[in-house]
Amino acid sequence: MSQLNQCCNRKIAIKVPQVDEYHDLVYSQVKGRWDTQELKMSLLVPRTEQLKPAVLYLPGGGFTEANLHKLIQLKLVLAEAGVVVASATYRTIPANLSAMVTDAKQALTYLYQQAAVYRIDPNKIAVIGDSAGGYLAQLLGTISQTPAISQTQVQSKQNQVAAVVSLYGFSNLLLMGADPKRPEFDPAAPTMLMLNGVSLAPQKRLMPAEITERARQASPLFKLHSGIPPFLLMHGDADQLVPLAQTKAMATAMRQAGLDAKEIILTGAGHGTAEWYQPEVAYLIRDWLLEKLDWDSGPLDLKQQTTL
């Protein structure tokens, strides 16, 4: 007789909390010329009473898309560790960098404003991103409490970032929009379209010196200062899209400035390849975040779980 047909009693140990999903929450509305664009966010919320840390995920996509539903395996690992995980879309090309940073700051502000609803500890909100999202996460970690780059000013207390995780992101735009065959910027490169906007009008085209200055001002590598939160910078040594040197330069610059930066290089990993979806990588990120956020969920308070 098959064991599948036998009746048995089995005690299940409770090791992770129930995780509730809230999707398509509108965190911001952007008025256009003819209509209004709704910017949406999804949340994974562990069902516990404790105040919890939170992570804002900014997806990559070459500044042409921002699919907030990516990296579900990593996000579930974080949620099962007791972390609220928010995933936010943002405006993409033809929108420019100022619009993207504004959206990222608004998403961060939304978490602060809804902290009591989702039991978020406002002192423990981190940012994570991959590729272009990794760049935005790094940038948010360096300018989040200032009005720099963004179109609107928000309260600095509602833009504080406690930690930053960048997965194969970039930190120096001076080296991301250049044509390797010519000593000049390629105006059609996504980084340049994001930085300078989309325009075919000759009078609106920027001179090389202007582009260089814009790229420098928008590069996290050149915006380091005291008080920047800890950074976890991860990259694959087989990445053919974003050079590994981008992560190495940022990690080196932060350490030289006396800032907290950890660099992890995945051997054989490319840009968003299968290595990034393995449990080991998720656990590395989880453990680093929980350490830097100084948070331990402790035993689950199952008797007082909350239904939101």
Image (cartoon, rainbow, N blue to C red):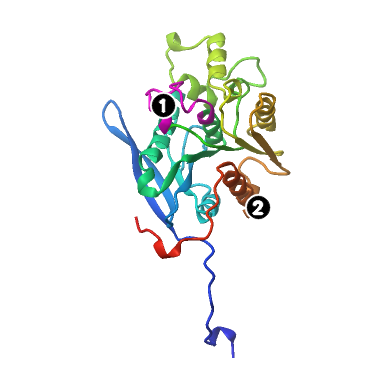
Examine the image and state in which quarter residue 226 appears: top right
Instruction: Judge from the rendering whether residue 252 lies leftward or rightward of residue 293; answer left or right.
Output: right
Q: Which residues lie in the magenta part?
A: 140-158
How many residues crowd around disc 1 within 10 Å: few (fewer than 14), some, or many (20 or more)? many
In the rendered structure, find residue 99 and report the number of the disc placed on it.
1
Residue 67 higher or lower than 243, as above or below? below
**Residue at horizontal 54 percent and vertical 27 percent from the top:** 142
Q: Is residue 156 magenta?
A: yes
The amino acid sitting under disc 2 is Glu
Which residue position is annotated with label 2? 280
**Residue at horizontal 48 percent and vertical 40 percent from the top:** 125
Q: Quadrant of the N terminus?
A: bottom right
**Secondary element at tag 1:** helix
Examine the image and state in which quarter residue 39 appears: top left
Q: Position of residue 196 (x, y in %)?
A: 48, 19
**Secondary element at tag 2:** helix
The secondary structure that most of the magenta stretch takes on is loop
Residue 188 higher or lower than 264, as above or below? above
Q: Position of residue 214 (x, y in %)?
A: 52, 16
Instruction: Judge from the rendering whether residue 9 lies leftward or rightward of residue 38; answer left or right.
Output: right
- Evaluate whether residue 281 shows in this view: yes
